[in-house]
Image: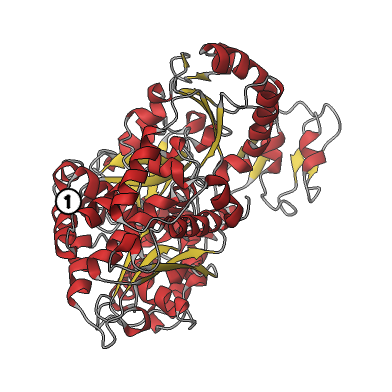
Amino acid sequence: MRAPEEVIKSLGLERHESVIEMENYLSEVTKKKSTEKTVVVAGGTCGRASGSQKVFQAFEEELKEKGLSEEVVLRSSGCIGYCDQEPLVLILPERILYPKVDPSNISDIIAHTVQKGEAVDDLLYKDPVSGERISSLDDFPFYKKQIRVLSGNNELIDPTNVLDYIATGGYSALVKILMEEITGKEIIHMISESGLRGRGGAGFPTGRKWDSARKSQSEDGKKYVICNADEGDPGAYANRGLLEANPHSVLEGMIIGAYSIDADEGYIYVREEYPLAIDYFDLAIKSANALGLLGDNILGTDFSFNIKVAKGGGAFVCGESTALTASIEGRAGEPRVKHIHSTEKGLFERPTVLNNVETWANVPVIVNKGYEWYSKIGTEGSKGTKMFSVVGKVRNTGLVEVPMGVTIKDIVHEIGGGVKGGKKFKAVQIGGPSGGCIPEEHMDLPIDYDSLTDAGAMMGSGGMIVMDEGTCMVDVAKYFVNFLKNESCGKCTPCREGLVQMHGLLTDIVEGKGGVEDLELLEDLAEVVKDTSLCQLGATAPNPILTTLRYFRDEYEAHIKDKRCPAKVCKALITFDIDADKCVGCQQCAKKCPVEAISGEAKEVHVIDQETCIKCGICQDTCKFEAVEVA
């Protein structure tokens, strides 16, 4: 990415000293919104990992060679959702979407689609069920059940170009507030009536939090707003996806939030593993400053607000609000007891509003479209949409945005395309490592705060991991408890010691050393840790255990009583054998075995030495004749 100063200069950004000036400027930029042919190359982290930068460069060179650089807009956007099909190329205004584009495809796309508006049939997405070729993004099964309130403009925005954001209506909510002199109290009323709840996990009513901070005062009058972008859940990347695609939507929400509670300083806390998101948000701050949307006396008003980027060191516990503020202050990222809420004494002991990336991005939408419009989306107790990163054993992995109240079935089977490899769905882990595993019998469960809590899971920051019949639920619980054990700050005894003991019990069970009495002990420990831990990391850490015991107790009993892993995953409880009727003696398994546990002459039946075998499964993956079996 070019240096921020270079980008700002190339865009011709100048500071505006009045609200009227800015209103006119927004209007001019919106009117100039390009209707020209546009080539969009999805350039989020997922796209880059799949080669989108090479595709972008190939388009750039080909357009230049054909003399089309001036009449065709080439844009690198953030993630547009369908990560499984990266690199993605979208042609506007036709909205023709090409999946898995290779630089060798560029000439055909330019010749037929860019120049003639015709789709290249062989390059289009082929529906795995119907076999139909699909050209329009809107007709993809992956997008059909989504309502993209926050992510719908991703393909229209270059995240490094503030003018793209403005062209889609960006910063009009802030200008509207300043132009109409809407008070902080009135804005908080809008947020409260919209029903917006925090998207970071707990689902606390946003308006109530803001109102508490507005009414609170410090001795020097100082207040803060913070964006929590410390997304540390395995498999979760909804926050990263939004920051990389539309950073200004988050920034505008924070500015409005600061205005509402009378704060003059803010922070966005981003984990350092998100370099692209950090770069884009830093540029967004500098671009907003250059236009006069940040800084002292914004647009000639009495409102001043500045924001800084704080980089997190990767500690999962720093996603907890008090640990996060401690980290910003330069102290160890450890939580504290919340006898006093952060809205009264938070960052540097001043009133503080801390919300998640997605929560902040919803704010401009609510101001612009009205709380009545927003509150019609979702359920009675959970309004609006929610972004999820859908990963695991599902055909269509990616970033989805759905209205609250859709079912697990809608996401897994309709949007996700069902379980891949023809296997049977078993469970979905919702809410990250502290979430719960929901089984097949609850596929019709509506996804909202209350329903997920009742089922033993949680909304979390938007991670959704799909599991098939080849997944061992005891091993899953062990994996997540081990993750949380390593991420515990160790400040309180229940979490520090309880997670170690629970992980030990789960390890004994998957190794065939567990006893029936371990199940009762495991449940008792889980309840103690849940009820007595200092922060939400410890309080929610037992969820993987409690939900797998609740819905998959028979698997635990099989490990203990029968010394058998039904999913054939736990190494101590399985053996690899070669079926003599299927083995053709090709010797491929013997050649690939890392410990030389397989013997046999060419064209003769091979044998596995069970004493030497480390049960890595390479032999089974290598065999083309399905002769290697797991028992």
- 329 to the left or right of 526: right
Q: Residue at x 34, y 79 (%)?
A: 534
Q: Residue at x 54, y 44 (%)?
A: 44
**Can you say which quadrant of the picture contains the C terminus?**
top right
- Residue 145: percent from the left, percent from the top? 32, 31
Would you say residue 540 is visible in this rendering?
yes
Give 143 or 433, whichever is nearer the viewer. Answer: 143
Q: Residue at x 63, y 34 (%)?
A: 56
- Residue 75: percent from the left, percent from the top? 54, 35
Which residue extends farthest right?
601
Disc 1, SS: helix
- 242 to the left or right of 607: left
- Residue 607: percent from the left, percent from the top? 75, 40
Give 226 or 60, whichever is nearer the viewer. Answer: 60
* Residue designated by label 1: 194
Image quarter of residue 467: top left
Q: Amino acid at mark 1?
A: Ser
Q: Compared with residue 539, is residue 471 higher up or lower down, i.e. above or below?
A: above
Would you say residue 625 is visible in this rendering?
no
Give 374 or 341, whichever is nearer the viewer. Answer: 374
Instruction: State the scheme by which the image is colored.
Output: secondary structure
Give 207 or 410, whichever is nearer the viewer. Answer: 207
Q: Residue at x 25, y 53 (%)?
A: 455
